Image (cartoon, grey):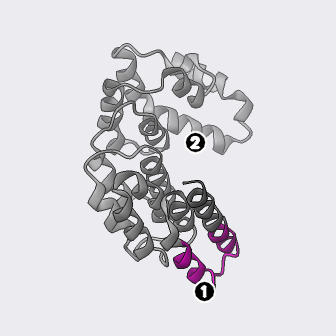
Amino acid sequence: MTARLKKFLELMQPYLTTANLKNDLIDRFLDSEKMYEDLRNAGYPDNLTFPHTTAYINALKPLPDDFIAIVIKWLPNLKHKEIAIDFLREAEHKYDGQVLIPIFIDGDFTVKWNIADAIAYNPPLGINEWVKETYLSAQYDQEAGLLALAIIKMFQKEEAIGIIKQGFDLHPEVAPEALGKVGGIKEIGFLEGKSKLPYKAKFIYKEIEKAIKKIKKRCKSS
């Protein structure tokens, strides 16, 4: 056992409740260690001097271009991609998002959800059309619904509204929230119509109602 792995396990001691969990944490450490080595060689602090990844990110964000370049270099080769995707969320400047497309396509639900969430939080460059096509594709379910929140940042307002409305029935869980952020008077009638449709997930009706109230409030104050 290397000194770094021993130190990592000491940090993780409160979470080592089972042998399987310990093995999983070791696997994750070994998986990302080369990426962290490159970051240390680039002058960034040792991640093991922080109690957890969130503290490491908070100490460094917004993450500079050279940091993000190292993460993007390693991302396709990582078995556990969640941490690297979290880094991309905090990129200081826009990066080329093309690296995310094959990872999304080949990834499981969790990877797809994490990527969609990262894109929605901090949209990268060069993937606008892919985001649109993915959101409008019946191939994907809730993991692509999050892209509605990216579309309102990546496209001009009227185009974004049109895209979200076009894919509303595919992703009614998130589309109301997106329309609530950018919609106008015309979208109130659209949402009222959608509220009359049958949804298995009852919270969708609440999301539609919240979106209508938000639009009315914004229109009233403008």
Residue depicted at x 49% and y 57% = 113
Q: Quadrant of the C terminus?
A: bottom right
Residue segment shown in magenta: 188-209
Q: Secondary structure at mark 2?
A: helix
Residue depicted at x 43% and y 28% = 33
Residue 194 lies, in percent from the top left, at 57, 81
Residue depicted at x 56% and y 60% = 219
- 190 or 129, which is in the foreground? 190
Q: Secondary structure at mark 1?
A: loop
Give neighbour class at mark 1: few <14, some 14-19, many 20+ (Cα, 10 Å): few
Q: Say if the magenta span includes residue 99.
A: no
Question: What residue does disc 1 label?
Answer: 197
Majority secondary structure of magenta residues: helix
Vertical placement of residue 2 versus 150, above or below? above
Residue 206's mark?
Answer: none
Vertical placement of residue 211 versus 125, above or below? below
Amino acid type indicated by mark 2: Asp
Amino acid type indicated by mark 1: Leu
Residue 35 lies, in percent from the top left, at 38, 29
Give neighbour class at mark 2: few <14, some 14-19, many 20+ (Cα, 10 Å): few
In the displayed structure, does residue 126 sit left or right of residue 42?
A: left
- 164 or 129, which is in the foreground? 164
In the rendered structure, are the residues bearing label 2 and label 1 in contact, judged by CB atoms less than 8 Å apart? no
In the displayed structure, does residue 137 sit left or right of residue 17?
A: left
Residue depicted at x 58% and y 62% = 215
Residue 24's mark?
Answer: 2
Residue 37 lies, in percent from the top left, at 39, 21
For marks 2 and 1, give the CA distance.
44 Å
- 40 or 149, which is in the foreground? 149
Q: Say if the magenta span includes residue 201.
A: yes
In the displayed structure, does residue 212 sit left or right of residue 47?
A: right
Count every numbered label the image shows and give the total: 2
